Image: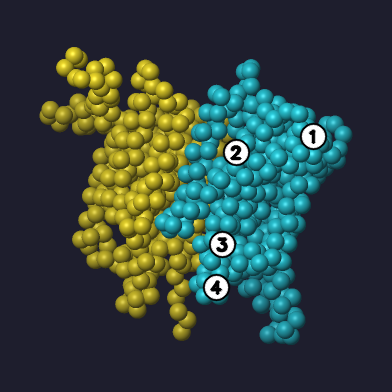
Chain colours: A yellow, B cyan
Amino acid sequence: MGRYPHGKEWCEAMRLFDVSLLLVSLRMSTSLILAAIGGVFSERSGVVNIGLEGMMLVGAFSGMLGSYWTGNPWMGVLAAMVSGGLLASLHAVVCIRYHANQAVSGAGMILLATGLSSFGLRAIFHHAGNSPTVNALNTTDILKSVPVIGDFLVLLPPFVYVAFAAVALAHFVIYKTPLGLRIISVGENPRAADTLGINVYAIRFGCVILSGVLAGLGGAYLSLGQLNLFQEGMSSGRGFIALAAVIMGKWTPIGAMLSCLLFGFADALQLKLQTIPGNLIPAEILLTLPYVIILLVLAGAVGRALPPAANGQPYKKAEG
Amino acid sequence: MSRRAYRLSTQVLEVLIPVITVLVALLLGAGLMLLVHKNPILAYRALWNGAFGSIRSVSETLVKATPLILTGLAVAFGFTSGVFNVGGEGQLLTGALAAAWVGYSIGGLPRFVHVPLALTSSAAIGALWALVPAIMKVACGAHEVITTIMMNWIAIYIVHYLVIGPLKAPGELPATPFILKSATLNRLLPEPSRLSTGILVAVACAILVFLVLRKTVLGYEVRAVGKNQDAAAYAGINVPRTVITSMLVSGMLAGLAGGVEVLGLHRRFYDAFSPGYGFDGIPIALLARNNPLGVLITALLFGALRNGASSMQIIAGIPKEIVVAVQGLIIVLIAGENLVRWAVTRTVRSGVKR
């Protein structure tokens, strides 16, 4: 301790950066990454999906419910993905088929999800705030046999690995397959894509529903991976953080993933900072850190990055 | 079809669509109730009685509608210029805290000075809270939905910190001290009615906003920018300045909503007093098609929903959160209004000779 010139404070700061910080960062980023990948697909095809937050919330709720009713957390995961997809399909129908204002529809999704999940919690469990605890997937036991780092890998829920796999898969699909090229073209210039025979509606539908499925999975992580119950309003803004990560990552899967990791790290750091003795910043102010970062990001990054050209504009097939 | 008949029929349609949207949403809500084995007819009757069944309920409905009128106006004004202000909640909270602080910490003022001062401060702080997203939208193209939502969260945490810390009144509750009598908005009706002159402030704002939009240059510019930014710019309108002004006005109205709640109803600021009034403004504005006078009606509707929902919970056993789901459904359906429009014109056209 005497080696360092600034002594105690420096050591305290250094103690922040240890393995547990890494673990917590990964844990905090997982739901963000899943939702963000969904966001990348949706926005790349030209549909803004602000309702990601809502799809995460219904995913969290349905995940808990599925595990509660069947006792099997994997059924919860399935339920979460289905419910996220269903909510997204409503968004898709309204925005793609009926040319709705996508931001408004997205906002409606969030309210709908909030209302449904809170209502469901009370109507089914006759309880406010938290659901009863359910069987969850907090650890990945099958990885225990991996040599050297097995004991470390077990500590992370399977969702974490699925999230990174999703990033790799998304990157492959978007940049290495014809489907990915079609998605990009639909987002940049749907009319040109349409004249080439690409089914703009179908691609957009598929991407939006996929974003709902992934966001639902991200929500399932909250209730089945991070905890083992559902709390009202569990998603607490993560859907928006995921959206900001998409923008920050310039609408690429890997960029979005890196942004999510940054946010997860900021979150983990803020938690850690709360525990240092002598820390003068009140906890509540630290809690605003992720949101302030997003504002800074949006102020700086968006000027440099261009969204898909047709993002947010409903596509109307020409008559005749 | 004569021109007059066509114009009349489109006007009828414009009013019909929000009405049908609400009915469809309520119908789906009924479906949800059936899903959990509850009686929707009993529920809606309890809702109606709870909202309008007695003088007391009507008074309480108006109480609930008061902040909704203002947040609805806030969102509507923003939408008129093409800006989606989702930050009503944050602007409301900061405005409310400002009003509370002015209300309890400045003594020796006569009422006709103190009340306007407190209300003005709530409006000013609300506008300030909308300033950052406004500038970011204009300068960096940042989507105002995300920036205003971020400001919401920041507001929630900062206000929470202030109310359990520096601005806290002695005692157990996370709340500020009560405001001085000189800052309160009078009650309109005798006890136990909670209705205050705040509702008059809200209605006056609605009329004011209507006049500004229809009769002033600013209102014209706001509407023009909302309809077509490029055309407005071509006509010489300073689009960035108009957008910023519009967001500031929107923030002002939302901040005022908070101020009115504190000065008229609660007489203090206590933590988490708003059950989402800022967000409620969105369906209210959408249903009213951004018409300030229409907002009065739709805000009343939502006040009734909120008020009646408590009775519905007690009598029919249905959690009042269903109202939030119904509101979300209304937003989605209104966003997809073409869906409703298509359905209605399909039905109508089959009966009308062309």
Gap in Å between the C-alphas at discs 3 and 1?
Answer: 36 Å
Q: SS at mark 4?
A: loop
Q: SS at mark 2?
A: helix
Q: SS at mark 1?
A: loop
- Res A72 seen here: no
Q: SS at mark 3?
A: helix
Q: Which residue is mark 2?
A: B93
Disc 4 marks a residue whose amino acid type is: Gly
Q: Compared to A94, does B112 lie above or below?
A: above
* Subunit bearing disc 3: B
Q: Which residue is mark 4?
A: B236
Gap in Å between the C-alphas at discs 3 and 2?
Answer: 25 Å
**Label at residue A88:** none
Disc 3 marks a residue whose amino acid type is: Thr
Q: Compared to B162, does A84 lie above or below?
A: below
Binning the other alpha carbons within 10 Å of mark 3 as few (below 14), some (14 to 19) or many (20 upward) gives many
State the image quarter where residue A239 is shown: top left
Residue at 38% from the left image edge and 75% from the top image edge: A191
In the rendered image, the residue lying farthest to the top is A2
Front position in the image: B63 or A207: B63
Residue at 74% from the left image edge and 75% from the top image edge: B8
> On the same chain: label 1 and label 2?
yes
> On the same chain: label 3 and label 1?
yes
Disc with the residue nearer the chain's start (3 vs 4):
4
- Res B117 seen here: yes
Q: Which residue is mark 1?
A: B110
Could you say where residue B115 lies in the image, as x and y percent from the top left?
75, 38
Gap in Å between the C-alphas at discs 1 and 2?
Answer: 26 Å
Residue at 55% from the left image edge and 33% from the top image edge: B159
- Which quadrant, please, contains the N terminus of chain B? bottom right
**Label at residue B242:** 3
